Amino acid sequence: MSEANNFLNKLRMADSATKRRWLVGLSFAAALIVVFAWGQYFNSLVLPPSAVQGGVPDQGQTFTFGQTLRAGLGVIWERVLASFHNLGTMLFSPKSYPVTPASQ
């Protein structure tokens, strides 16, 4: 434990550039750990049913996290393009506003 305290004390006394490098490096490492854990979580969600004990026998098709992510991004991309198409149609269509007289 004293080695960790010595390291922290040396880091406290270091210049700002050294502190910043350690901050960036440790933040990057923490982000990688979180992304890895997130990926493993999603991989566990898309495992084939036969991978789960007592599951349904494998039917020959398995989905990985990457395949599932790619398929989901494809669906989202299609919807975004359709929204832009609808917006363009609405903005560039001829404007006609029917006006009806008010009833008295």
Image: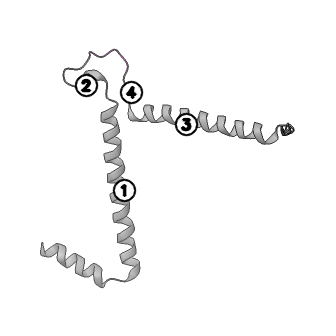
Q: Residue visible at 39% across and 81% down?
A: 16
**Nearer-N-terminus badge (3/4):** 4
In the structure shown, which secondary structural element does the residue marked by tag 1 occupy? Answer: helix
Say which mark, if any, is on residue 63: 4
Specify whether residue 75 is painted magenta.
no
Q: How many marks?
A: 4
Do residues under tags 2 and 3 come within 8 Å of each other at their CB atoms? no
Q: Position of residue 26 (x, y in %)?
A: 33, 64
Q: Which residue is mark 3?
A: 76
**Residue 81 shown left or right of residue 66 in the figure:** right
Q: Residues within 10 Å of mark 1 (few under 14, many from 20)?
A: few
| Amino acid type shown at disc 3 | Ile
Q: Nearer the viewer, residue 45 or 31?
A: 45
Do residues under tags 4 and 1 come within 8 Å of each other at their CB atoms? no
Give the alpha-carbon distance from disc 1 to disc 3, as whole Å: 25 Å
> What range of the chain is rendered magenta?
57-61
Do residues under tags 1 and 3 come within 8 Å of each other at their CB atoms? no
